[in-house]
Image (cartoon, rainbow, N blue to C red):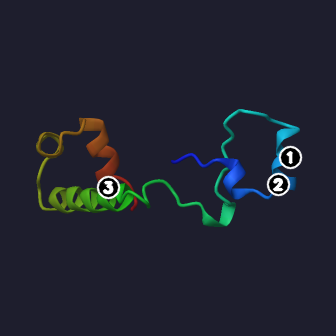
Amino acid sequence: MKYVNAKSIFPKELLEEIQKYVNGEMVYVPISKGLQKKWGERSGSKNYLKQRNLEIRQRFSVGVTIEQLSNQFFLSHDSIKKIVYSKE
């Protein structure tokens, strides 16, 4: 996130109105609701984890044990169990 000087983007009247509430402080302006992205969509993490979990399920279905998957993917035994027994 980068910071922008309010003086360079807001009309003078709006800046004066904002200064009635906060003056000389940093203010975070959140993204509009319709433009927000869900977790992992921007970085690709969501897709990566979806593919990884699919691979774990496929390996489990052909007989790879939970312990072996745990070692291969560096995840806990319980994490592997959650992945292979989930309904996704």
- The secondary element bearing badge 3 is classed as helix
Q: Residue at x 48, y 53 (%)?
A: 39
The residue beneath circle 3 is: 49
N-term mark: 1 or 3: 1
Q: CA distance from mark 1 to mark 3?
A: 47 Å
Q: Residue furthest bottom?
A: 34
Q: CA distance from mark 1 to mark 2?
A: 6 Å
Residue 38 bears which disc, if any? none
Single out the mark in the foreground, 3 or 2. Answer: 2
Q: Amino acid at mark 3?
A: Leu
Q: Residue at x 82, y 54 (%)?
A: 12
Q: Is residue 69 above or below residue 10?
A: above
How many residues crowd mark 1 within 10 Å: few (<14), some (14–19), many (20+)? Answer: some
Q: CA distance from mark 3 to mark 2?
A: 47 Å
Residue 23 is situated, as x and y percent measured from the top left of the image, at 78, 34
Residue 33 is situated, as x and y percent measured from the top left of the image, at 68, 61
Q: Is residue 34 above or below residue 43?
A: below
N-term mark: 3 or 2: 2
The residue beneath circle 2 is: 12
How many residues crowd mark 2 within 10 Å: few (<14), some (14–19), many (20+)? Answer: few
Disc 3, disc 2: CB below 8 Å?
no
Of residues 40 and 21, the one nearer the viewer is 21
Q: Amino acid at mark 1?
A: Glu
- The secondary element bearing badge 1 is classed as helix
Q: Is residue 39 left or right of residue 83?
A: right
Of residues 36 and 80, the one nearer the viewer is 36
How many residues crowd mark 3 within 10 Å: few (<14), some (14–19), many (20+)? Answer: few
Q: Is residue 41 left or right of residue 4?
A: left
